[in-house]
Amino acid sequence: MKIIAIFLLLSITIFGQDFKGTVLDKETKQPIFYSQVYFVDLKTGTTTDHNGIFKIEHFNQKYIHIQISFVGYKIIDEIVNIDTVKEKTFYLEQGYFNLEEIVVSTPSGILQKENIVSIEHKKITELQQTSPLTLADAISNISGVDQTTTGAGIGKPVIRGLSGNRIVTYAQGIRIENQQWGDEHGLGVGEVGIESVEVIKGPASLLYGSDALGGVLYFIDERYASHNTVEWFAQTKFLSNTLGSINNISYKIHKGRLKFNLFGAYSSHADYQAPNFDRVFNTRFDEKNIKISMGFNTKNWISNIRHSYLQNNYGIVEDANFTNSNQRKFVLSFQTIDNHNLSFENIVFTGNSKLNLTLGYTNNYRKEFEDDSNNQALGLKLNTFTYKLKWYSQIYKDRFDFIVGSQGMAQDNKNNGEEILIPDATIKDFGAFILGHLNFERLQLQGGIRADYRGIDTKQMVTGEGSFPALKNSYNGFTFSSGTVYKLRKTKFRTNISSGFRAPNTTELLSDGVHHGTNRYIKGDVNLKNENATQLDFSFDYQDEHFSFSVNPFYNAIQNYIFLSPIDTVIDNSPVFEYLQTSAFLYGGELGFHYHPHKIHWLHLESNLSTVIADDKNRNPLPLIPQTKINSTVRVEITHKGKMRLKNLFVQHIYKFKQDKTGLFETSTNDYSQINIGLNLIITTKNNPIEISTGIKNLFNTKYIDHLSRFKTLEIPNQGINYYIGIKLKLNEKLNDKRG
């Protein structure tokens, strides 16, 4: 820590630089005023003046990430070396096609077109077009991503057939821990205050450590307001199927060097309605979310502190019961989950280097009430402290950059209920890595290695339903990643080989008792070994002015794959499941295209296919592998300015194939189709836009049961037809710019 402190003090004395930019129309060479300019590292921005000019002052960094956008033009994402370039003119080109975004989930924050791994980057507003009920529901629209669902309110992400503790979630710049081993609760992250999400598919242990075996969900916070600006919005939406409402509000202010964001959200839903118009009893849920962000910056130092509180209440479905009631009051059985996430980020710039230190704390408290609403049957408290330290440096005439980093975690799990599913435990993680990147005109090369340690220490506990022996184990992992990307005119070729590891969690090691939420008696195994994965990933991308195409096949081999298997035994009237290990092989990929016809700039045709095949070493299918999915959309976007314009009109068709490659005691699932339609209107009054959205999900009220629905064994269908309507109000106000 002394070294870090000295580094910070020395860096303050380094003189900052100024940069001036001008934004012009590429054809007319006329200035584009009021275009949006966003500085990625500062997480804030500004707008151009009447001459198309913007400035950034006293910025002590060799490279600055700039994103420039204006309605009806292609977004510019560019990294500028301000050591050599003090002024630059940016030419916006008229266009309506897909854009290359800066990828935040990689340590260096490079453009997606230069990234070794193909990462899916989606804005939350884009994913919200079909009015999803939850954040997990929203990201399941991404190719290669599905969700394990429990009713309408609970969803757990599945990336290329892997989920739970094999997926690492990042939000607010820190790792979010919310007892991922449980299927019967949600993601642990609310969508309020989130701008976009990036999905890394496949092993990412090099950057994120143990558990990133199947991939990473990286949620990016909503940016601060533009300099010397106040921004706020209020949004409400009504959904017919759950008789639900979703309400959001935000307030953002940026004055001088200080930035502040405040977000709040509340949603409430009754039991969801099946296609037969009966409601599935006790699928009601609600969500409360508050998030605060504060930022401060000097010429060479950026600091951000963020806190979010999320409370979820869910009914627990034990049988296939239906009702006509629209009650929202929670009845037995139900669960309450409280999440606190606190992060403190500091970035120091020193010429061509930067140091990033992020500290995090998460608190997850899960309570289940079964027989008495005043006495919790299950109480699990999880406290997690994390740190992330990275030093990034770019040298040798911008041809070579490298990152040296370390991550760690200290975790404490305690029981506070009548039932005990897992014993009290402490977990300690430590990892260190180095990653190098070579940049040539057409060729990018990247490689790195990492070492990890995980220690698990539990206490001996005896319960009425079972016992837990004391356990003190340690697990070590060594991972690597190597890849290339080659650019040739309108095409990009990517190849990547990466490894990942996951230490068994306490549930898999020590479970011994009935879990009433799943109606299973679960037994662990203290002799379980590390899971080790090696994935080969290929990508081919083509894009011209009107058409883009991509294909992304993969092959993932996992040694010591841990899975839950039923055995022919019953304890306490519950079937017994035990954790076993085998070798697993997953392969498949994603294929997609986007067509934007010439001279019909308002029309977009999109489609993507994702598929996964998963077998064990004996060629037996693994359980809970998602159905092959085709997601197709016809979309109309109007970009002209006016008091009223059609922002978006779409028809979406989702087709999921029959899943008959099933695991032991798992039943097959029929194919099904779903049609969703919707539109978004923008009405502008005095430069304050009002956005109205409406649509219908499951237009033809199709009766289906998704393969990853936990209600499948109860033969409870998924949601029927759902009408929705929403309104969003925005207000931006410029503050007086008084500079001393």
Image (cartoon, helix red, strand yellow):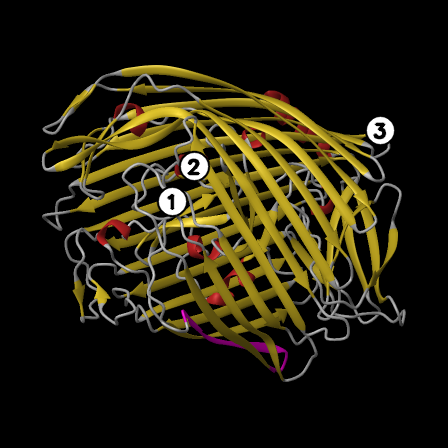
Mark positioned earlier in the residue sequence (2 or 1): 1
Label 2, on which residue?
361
3D distance between C-alphas at marks 2 and 3: 38 Å
Q: Does residue 693 belong to the magenta stretch?
A: yes
Q: Does residue 177 belong to the magenta stretch?
A: no
Residue 98 in picture, x, y percent from top left: 69, 60
Number of numbered discs overlaid on the protein picture: 3
Q: Identity of the amino acid at label 1? A: His
Q: Nearer the viewer, mark 2 or mark 3?
A: 3
The answer to whether residue 10 is above or below residue 124 is above
Mark positioned earlier in the residue sequence (2 or 3): 2
The answer to whether residue 700 is above or below residue 14 is below
Residue 636, picture quadrant: bottom right
Residue in the image at 80% along x and 36% along y: 443
Q: Secondary structure under badge 1?
A: strand
Label 3, on which residue?
396
- State the residue in front, 535 or 294: 535
- State the residue in front, 649 or 547: 547
Label 1, on which residue?
340
Q: Residues within 10 Å of mark 2 (few under 14, many from 20)?
A: many
> Which stretch is magenta?
684-698
Residue 446 in picture, x, y percent from top left: 71, 30
Residue 396 in picture, x, y percent from top left: 84, 29
Dominant secondary structure of the residues highlighted in magenta in the image: strand
Q: Identity of the amino acid at label 2? A: Tyr
Residue 600, picture quadrant: bottom right
Q: Secondary structure under badge 2?
A: strand
Q: Identity of the amino acid at label 3? A: Tyr
Q: Residues within 10 Å of mark 3 (few under 14, many from 20)?
A: few
Mark positioned earlier in the residue sequence (3 or 1): 1
Report the disc number at residue 83.
none
